[in-house]
Image (cartoon, helix red, strand yellow):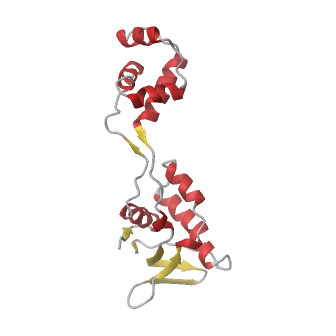
Amino acid sequence: MPHGEGNTLGAALNSLLAGFGAQPRNRLKSYRAKGWHAQLVHLTETHRGYAELERAGLGVTHATLMKWLADDEYTVRRAYRETIHQAYEAAATTPAGPIPQNFKDHQFEIRGLVKTGADERERGARGTAPLRIDGRNGHWASIESKWQGGELDDGSFEDDFIDFVICDDIGEGTDGWEFSGTWYTIS
């Protein structure tokens, strides 16, 4: 069974998500060109690049495109340079895979310092029970949206997990949740 570890709850959650095989949004290492001409050359070497140029709305004739490729000193309007850059950035990024359903349906066991109201204790240590959360009761839309957009950093994952998974599982009658410890393990 996968488990995640980290110096914050969000870091442990991201570690656990990786253990479930989820692939984050990623920048391809081969896309390092800086100038518009180098970016255009790189884009026109692949079908994916041409598709991104079309998707970005580069509306020039084939002859114009060939002139641009043949001469890196060719004067290109700023709007076209921006469109080329936009297509290049889109082609350079692989989309995130979906958050696996078995992750969202997971029975989370959180070990580490947990505080709710006046109750603050180390969960899952020295014979105490871990905090158990049923992921099936959570509302994952915000987390999935941030994941797909490449914006699910440790802090936002922790915040949204508290708001949309923990509170939805345990209920709104709690006095807030804090995870201010220095190490968390989730299984």
Q: Nearer the viewer, residue 29 or 9?
A: 29
- Horizontal placement of 46 versus 151: left or right? left
* Percent x, y of residue 180: 48, 72
Q: Residue at x 54, y 53 (%)?
A: 146
Q: Position of residue 152 (x, y in %)?
A: 49, 55
Quick one: quadrant of the C terminus?
Answer: bottom left
- Give the residue furthest to the bottom: 127
For the N terminus, give its image quadrant.
Answer: bottom left
Q: Residue furthest right?
A: 173
In the image, 180: left or right of 140?
left
| Picture layout, residue 84 above or below residue 97 | above
User: Of all residues shown, which one is farthest toward the front?
Assistant: 47
**Quarter occupied by residue 36:** top left
At horizontal 39% and vertical 64% (from top left) the residue drawn is: 20
Q: Position of residue 147 (x, y in %)?
A: 50, 53
Number of numbered markers: 0
Residue 123 position (above or below residue 42): below
The residue positioned 61% from the left and 79% from the top of the image is 170
Looking at the image, is 120 positioned above or below residue 38? below
Q: Residue at x 47, y 59 (%)?
A: 99
Left or right: 28, with 172 as reference point: left
Front-most of 58 and 47? 47
